[in-house]
Amino acid sequence: MSQERTELAELVLDVADQVPPGRVTTYGLVAEAVRAASGHGHPRHVGTVMAVYGAEVPWWRVVRADGTLPRQLRARALENYRAEGTPLSPFVPVRVDLERALWDAPTEWRVPTVGPCA
């Protein structure tokens, strides 16, 4: 893994770790915060980082734009959502109600600025 990738991965994990219990953010919003700090960042990169390193942070708090996670993670995520009181959709099993649960706080995210990552 390249050094640039490692720095970006650390930024992604920093942001994911800041999402409060009972709230969620999206891959896209994490990518925006990382891009603001580093000049680089894409939702798919966030997904890759979460797939590889997500166990180090509350991974269930970073969801797709529709409020879901990949099917294989939904049962484990549901346990965490219930424990934290995360608002869920009454119509779709294991979909977070983004209107009530979204933590869209990029100005509050404390993401250290890093040098250019090529």
Image (tube, helix red, strand yellow):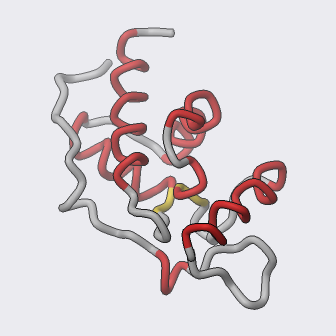
Comparing 91 with 36, the one in front is 91
Task: Give above or below for 44 relative to 94.
Answer: above
Residue 44 image offset from top left, x and y in percent: 56, 42
Residue 115 image offset from top left, x and y in percent: 17, 23
From the viewer's perspective, tell me whether residue 99 is left or right of residue 3.
right
Q: Identify the image quadrant of the C terminus.
A: top left
From the viewer's perspective, tell me whether residue 82 is left or right of residue 35.
right
From the viewer's perspective, tell me whether residue 16 is left or right of residue 1.
left
Task: Give above or below for 86 relative to 55.
Answer: below
Task: Give above or below for 23 relative to 48.
Answer: below
Residue 91 figure quarter: bottom right
Residue 50 figure quarter: top right
From the viewer's perspective, tell me whether residue 70 is left or right of residue 85.
right
Instruction: Give the total number of marks visible in the rendering.
Output: 0
Residue 32 image offset from top left, x and y in percent: 34, 52
Say which residue appears at 42% left-offset and 20% top-offset.
5
Comparing 70 with 59, the one in front is 59
Q: Residue furthest front?
A: 83
Residue 85 figure quarter: bottom right
Residue 31 image offset from top left, x and y in percent: 40, 48
Say which residue appears at 35% left-offset and 46% top-offset.
15
Q: Residue furthest top?
A: 2
Say which residue appears at 49% left-offset and 65% top-offset.
24
Say which residue appears at 75% left-offset and 54% top-offset.
76
